[in-house]
């Protein structure tokens, strides 16, 4: 299942060799649907994906694509536990949206169009004078 999120790279950790043939690197993303309550989420990069984080700096806005993984584990005492992981597989910088020439910036309303010359604009109408 592929998911994605955009946020700020909050913390990146060094790559760890878990065994002779397995390595992983963790990093934390800060994102906030509500800026008053930011969320800090840990992702992991495994094997050859561990190098994907190299070109990025803490504080940079990123887009992360990842898979949600879960597994069950039974301890030697017979206790069952469940673990989740977020396995990142693509990281890209978030590009700032710049307005194109002649278009207003995102979030602004353009002025209403002017009525054609000679059109009724309603300013000279009486209360009982309707334009239709």
Image (cartoon, rainbow, N blue to C red):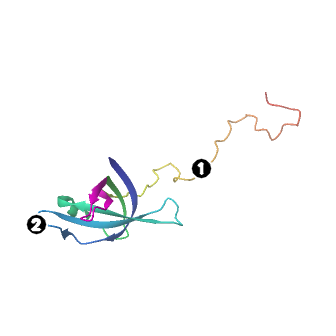
The image quarter in which residue 26 lies? bottom left
Give the residue furthest to the top.
132
Q: Which residues are magenta?
A: 69-90
Q: Quadrant of the C terminus?
A: top right
Mark identifier at residue 37: none
Q: Label 2 crowding class (10 Å Cα cut-off): few <14, some 14-19, many 20+? A: few
Per the image, the residue denoted by label 2 is 20
The image quarter in which residue 48 lies? bottom left
| Residue 112 is one of the magenta-drawn residues | no
* Residue occupying image coordinates x 30% and y 53%: 69
* Residue occupying image coordinates x 27% and y 72%: 13
In this rendering, position of residue 100 left or right of residue 12? right
Q: Position of residue 39 (x, y in %)?
A: 45, 64
The rendered magenta stretch, by its main secondary structure, is classed as: strand
Q: Position of residue 23 (x, y in %)?
A: 18, 65
Residue 42 versus residue 67 in the image, above or below: below
Instruction: Mark 1 or mark 2: name the one nearer the start of the chain.
Output: 2
Q: Secondary structure at mark 2?
A: loop
Residue 99 versus residue 112 in the image, above or below: below
| Residue 73 is one of the magenta-drawn residues | yes
User: Label 1, label 2: how many angstroms apart (C-alpha)?
Assistant: 59 Å
Judging depth in this view, the residue of 83 and 96 nearest the camera is: 83
Mark identifier at residue 109: 1
* Residue occupying image coordinates x 10% and y 66%: 20
Q: Nearer the viewer, mark 1 or mark 2?
A: 2
Q: Position of residue 15 (x, y in %)?
A: 21, 69
């Amino acid at each position: 299942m592929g998911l994605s999120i955009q946020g700020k790279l909050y913390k990146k950790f060094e790559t760890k060799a878990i065994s002779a043939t397995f390595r992983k690197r963790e990093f934390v993303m800060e994102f906030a649907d509500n800026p008053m309550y930011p969320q800090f989420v840990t992702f992991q990069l495994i094997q050859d994906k561990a190098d994907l984080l190299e070109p990025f700096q803490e504080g940079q806005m990123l887009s992360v694509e990842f898979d949600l993984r879960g597994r069950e584990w039974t301890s030697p005492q017979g206790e069952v536990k469940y673990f989740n992981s977020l396995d990142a597989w693509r990281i890209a910088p978030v590009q700032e949206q710049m307005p194109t020439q002649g278009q207003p910036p995102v979030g602004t309303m353009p002025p209403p169009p002017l009525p054609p010359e000679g059109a009724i604009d309603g300013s000279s109408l009486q209360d009982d004078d309707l334009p239709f």
